[in-house]
């Protein structure tokens, strides 16, 4: 649930930056806001292995040993997580990483990684909606309403 809170704060900072530019505010807080925004994004990215891997310590050990590259969890090498965790982890990640993958302030490489993670969630956790939102340039509100229902149902598991 921390990622939902983080992405809400990211969206708020993103909106503040946009409004600041529109209002032509005399003060420039862009750098401070950008640093905070990227800090939240980094926290979300750091949490991905803990949500998707059944055995996070093994995954992190393999990462430290150089067996797994940081961007290898996506399409290029989906086998880097040897044993996927429970699908509820993927359900909890879908919305935050989708939103972050669509923000222009997030570095392109990170956005691509998040899209690859959505594809990985669809393929290895059997959550087809993850593939749908990974491929869609714009997602309609109805899809997120369905997603909220899926996450709610996942919490009951």
Image (cartoon, helix red, strand yellow):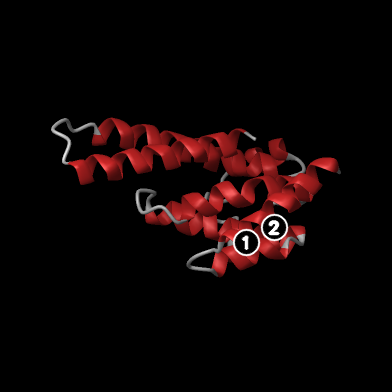
Task: Check disc 1: other Cα within 10 Å, few if <14, some if 14-19, many if 20+.
Answer: few
Residue drawn at x 73%, y 48% as measured from the top left: 151
* Residue 99 appearing in the image: yes
Q: Is residue 40 left or right of residue 56?
A: left
Q: Quadrant of the rendered structure where residue 33 is?
A: top left
Question: Relative to 111, is 35 above or below?
Answer: above
Instruction: In the rendered view, tell whether residue 141 sits above or below residue 97.
Output: below
8 above or below 116? above
Q: Which residue is mark 1?
A: 142
Foreground: 38 or 142?
A: 142
Question: Which residue position is annotated with label 2?
Answer: 146
Dot 1 falls on a residue whose secondary structure is: helix
The label shown at residue 44 is none
Asked if residue 106 lies left or right of residue 140, the reply is left
Contact flag, marks 2 and 1 (Cβ < 8 Å)? yes
Which residue is depicted at the point 75% across and 57% down? 125
- How many residues crowd mark 2 within 10 Å: few (<14), some (14–19), many (20+)? few
Residue, far right: 157
If the image is split into quadrants, where does the N terminus sit? top right
Residue 52: percent from left, percent from top = 69, 47
User: Spatial distance from mark 2 to mark 1, Cα to Cα?
Assistant: 6 Å
């Amino acid at each position: 649930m921390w990622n939902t809170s983080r992405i809400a704060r990211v969206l708020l900072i993103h909106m503040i930056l946009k409004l600041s530019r529109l209002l032509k505010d005399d003060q420039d807080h862009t750098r401070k806001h950008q640093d905070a925004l990227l800090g939240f994004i980094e926290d979300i990215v750091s949490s991905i292995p803990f949500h998707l891997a059944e055995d996070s310590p093994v995954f992190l050990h393999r990462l430290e040993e150089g067996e797994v590259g940081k961007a290898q969890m996506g399409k290029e090498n989906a086998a880097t997580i040897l044993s996927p965790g429970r699908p509820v982890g993927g359900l909890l990640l879908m919305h935050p990483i989708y939103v972050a993958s669509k923000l222009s302030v997030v570095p392109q490489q990170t956005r691509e990684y998040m899209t690859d993670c959505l594809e990985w969630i669809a393929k290895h956790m059997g959550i087809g909606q993850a593939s749908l939102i990974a491929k869609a340039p714009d997602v309609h509100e109805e899809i997120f309403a369905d997603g909220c229902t899926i996450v709610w149902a996942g919490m009951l598991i």
